[in-house]
Amino acid sequence: MARTAVPPALAANPRLAEITRREEERVAKVVADHAAWLAEQSFGAIDPHTGEPRRVRPTDIIAQRREWASNGMPGEETTDTIGKLWAFGLLDNGEFAADLLRDAGRRYAASYWRRFGPVCARSGAYAEMTGRSSGGPPAIVIPDAELDALAEQRFRDRDDALRAAGRMVKKEIDLVCVDGQGDNDPTWLLDLMNGYPRETREARLILAAAEAQVPTLTGEARRKAIRRYDDARRALAQKQREARIDRLPHSEVHRIVTGLVELARIDRREGLHRPKRTRKPEEGD
């Protein structure tokens, strides 16, 4: 692993130079261990003919669960609660694109755990937090009072903005961003992801019965069975839409979006929003 360039101020201080060297060695070991773990996960069976490991594809059940949790969106973006809210279209608003709100929530969570991780009972899960929502190997940790002060200010700006938006706004954002790491989803979100099983039970039974009847018929009877199946599928979709309107806590969702908009405004002021170009840059741009 190539050594990270050490600033002259650190190079002149033997103690800090030694800290840097040890940190580089620690990070190199973490990266190597992570690569070894990934290699083990990629190969889960032995070829009976060659004795070599072979790749194993996820089972149908795992693939279905991933698709269920991502709502057809990229699976790597739906491993946390804020990502699922984005995937199911709950972050739409008139000021920012939904993915900018999603990332604003993740940046707030990263700044929160950088600030409170060392004094929190949950800090073990965030010991290697780098501020990147997608994870990855840890960054080199070098004492830097100026960067620490900047990180503290960035957290304070976001925390103050949420508090100014209202106590309940701050609470909702903390629930879905700070505490929402994929295993702590609110019940109403799980109901939405499951298609409101209680509210749509009868429609699901009708659909299952219609689907089971199609393979047993031929000719005109089969065509009628297919039409009944299509009608049952549309009826289920309609029930799910009605349940979403009736059961979704719209006030909570509104508070979440309100808080994320405040965070996204800070991201924009900090220059973190880079609009996509719609044309090639020309001379003078």
Image (cartoon, rainbow, N blue to C red):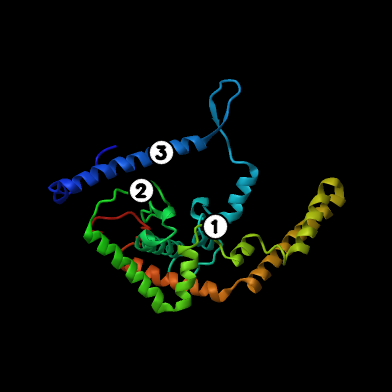
| Residue at 42% across, 53% down | 124
Horizontal side, residue 111 vs residue 167: left or right: left
| Residue at 63% across, 49% down | 64
Per the rendering, the mark at residue 33 is: 3
| Residue at 39% across, 69% down | 263
The answer to whether residue 94 is seen in the rendering is no
Horizontal side, residue 20 vs residue 198: left or right: left
Q: State the CA–CA distance, disc 1 to disc 3.
A: 25 Å
Q: Is residue 247 above or below residue 35?
A: below
Q: Position of residue 51 (x, y in %)?
A: 56, 22
Name which residue type carries label 2.
Answer: Pro
Q: Position of residue 87 (x, y in %)?
A: 54, 59
Q: Is residue 192 above or below residue 222?
A: below
Q: Nearer the viewer, residue 7 or 218?
A: 7
Quadrant holding the C terminus:
bottom left
Horizontal side, residue 128 vs residue 13: left or right: right
Are the residues flagged by discs 2 and 3 in contact, CB closer than 8 Å? no
Q: Which residue is mark 2?
A: 138
Quadrant holding the N terminus:
top left
Name which residue type carries label 1.
Answer: Asp
When asked about the image quadrant of residue 129, the answer is bottom left
Per the rendering, the mark at residue 183 is: 1
Name which residue type carries label 3.
Answer: Asp
Are the residues flagged by discs 1 and 3 in contact, CB closer than 8 Å? no
Q: Earlier in the sequence, mark 2 or mark 1?
A: 2
Q: State the CA–CA distance, disc 2 to disc 3.
A: 12 Å
